[in-house]
Structure formats: C-alpha cells, structure tokens
Amino acid sequence: MRVVVTGGAGFIGSAFINRLKDKFPDVDVLCVDKLTYAGNMDNIKHDVTLLQKDICDVTAQDLGNYDYLVHFAAESHVDNSIKDGRPFVRTNVEGTFNMIECARQNPKLDKFIHISTDEVYGDMNDVGENHSATEEESLKPSSYYSATKAASDMLVQGAHRTFGLPYLITRTCNNYGEHQNPEKFLPKIYNCIKNDEPVPVYGDGMQIREWIYVYDNADVILDLMFDETAINTVYNIGSGNQYTNIGLVNKIAQVLGKEVKIEFVPDRLGHDREYSLNCNKLRQYYVDNDFNQSYDNINDYLERLYK
C-alpha cells in the first residue's frame, strides 16, 4: 500500500504519518511538503520519502501511483490571512485544485482525504444559543483562511460530482500536542508565561474553542480512511472539550505555578465567538463498528507536557 500525505512535515500531518507508520509499518509513505516555517521533517519519527515541493507545482508524475492521498497542506494562521490573504488563496484553493487534478490521473486511487476545519461553519453565536454545526450546516466562513478552506471543500465535492473523485472530508476542531508551531495559541501562551511576558488576549478572552489531541485526531482520520463505507461524505471530528481562551491562559499559568500577566488587545477583525461541532455522525460510526472512541483531555495534556 502507498499513501501520499501533503503537509506531512507539519504539526497535524506529521502526527498522522507517525500514527500511520506506528500501526502499519509496511505502508510506503510519500511526504509532500514545501518545508516552510511550519514544516519540520524531525517531527516524523519514521523513514519516509520526502518530495519537497509546493503543492501548486506538484505533478501527477511526481506522485506516481498510490492508494490514498491525504491532503493536510494549507496556510492556517488566521492572523496572517488578515494581513495578506493571497498566500491562502494560492495554497488552500489553487493548491487543493492542483492536488485534485493530480489525484484524478491516478488509476489506483481509493480515496482523496481532505482535511478541513470547524471554522468553515462560522460563528455558532450567529446561529443560536448552544448550537453545534452538523455536517449538513451551511458554510459561513468569517476570514480569508476559513473562506479558502470552505472553497477547497467545495472543490473536492465538485470534483466528485463531475468526475467521480472518491473523497472523504474531515472537519476538525482545534488541535493541540507535541511539535505545534510556537505561533499557535497554546505554545504562545506557554512561552509568554514561562518567560514572564504579558499574554496578549483578544477582546474579553471569552471566545470558546473546542480542542482535540492531535494523535486522537490522527486516529480518527485513519479509521475513516481505511473504512470503505466512509466514502464521498463529510465527518466532523470533535472531542466535546470546550474552553474559553482566557480559561486556557489561566490553566497554563496554574500548571506552571506562575502569575500570568494578561494584556487585553483589540479584538481580531471578524473574530468568531464560538466554534462547536455536532459529532453525532462520528459517534454513531463508532457505535456501528462496535468501538468506543475516547479522547485525551487537554487538562491532562497540559499537566503532562508543561510540568
């Protein structure tokens, strides 16, 4: 079996490759990664083949034949998309289109797995109190980042309708875990508190996010990838672990045993107040397969990693 993983040297992509090779050592993995600031081959603890190339420039000949293409590669930092959305349009839209076109030329393709985000659904506060997005929810992205991810989702679904591309889309909540880039929320908070620097918090800090351990996410993606019934469909992947931003700041300070200096800054443009995923479809999937899926708790992770 051969699997192509785009963005495989990144935070989530490398965790996926590690889990894949842990469980299936004989799988041949091609990691496609441009190796920007967000990619590091040291994140991968197994021997894999690297194709160092921009996904916009990858050709079908570069990839050869393979059974699965798992598409993680994306520009993902919302603040960066506000400053300049062009790289997001290029990578997330044009890059996804190019990978679809490459996949369409592969006669062995079992499934194109596209990794998306809960942000495509937009702010749940705009929908109603205590609302969680199902897979059938309308997409209402709020930033250039989430808009380009929504566009890439639709490209995948359009390729299925027009050309019969076999696909799976996963929409996942915020990931946490080892090897996360320092620009991201949890590592940034940790470094600020550890170094006695003020922690910048947007608005009132009461924005709500759902969090999942990166290897738990990888496990679910693997289960769905190899299941022949999980085809031409969308699955939300969430843990049910929701926290306010300010709550996580205080929790990390508590774990480190340090006082936290919070610096409230003007809220981010278009900032969503709450993301929440309805994962009944995924829960039913595990019930139907007679398997009880459990998730790491972010509090346990913080205690384990930061103490």
Image: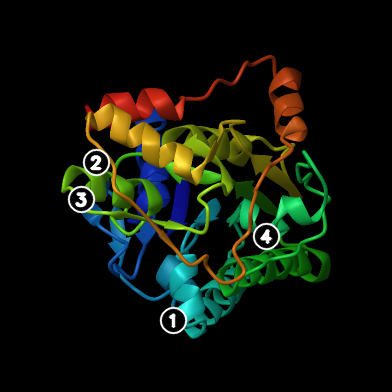
Q: Position of residue 216 (x, y in %)?
A: 48, 32
106 vs 127, left or right, is: left
Q: Which residue is mark 2?
A: 45
The secondary element bearing badge 3 is classed as helix
Among the two numbered marks 1 and 4 on one chain, the one whose residue lies closer to the N terminus: 1
What residue lies at 59% left-to-right and 37% top-to-bottom?
A: 226
Residue 139 figure quarter: bottom right
Q: Which mark is residue 42?
A: 3
User: Residue 305: x, y in percent?
Assistant: 26, 30
Q: Is residue 121 above or below residue 156?
A: above
Residue at 83%, 50% (x, y): give it: 136
- What colour-coding does the image apply? rainbow
Q: Specify few, some or many for label 3: CA neighbours under 10 Å numbering under 14, 14-19, or 20 or more.
A: few
Q: Are marks 3 and 2 in contact (CB under 8 Å)?
A: no
Classify residue 21 by image quadrant: top left
The residue beneath circle 1 is: 57
In front of the other: label 3 or label 4? Answer: 4
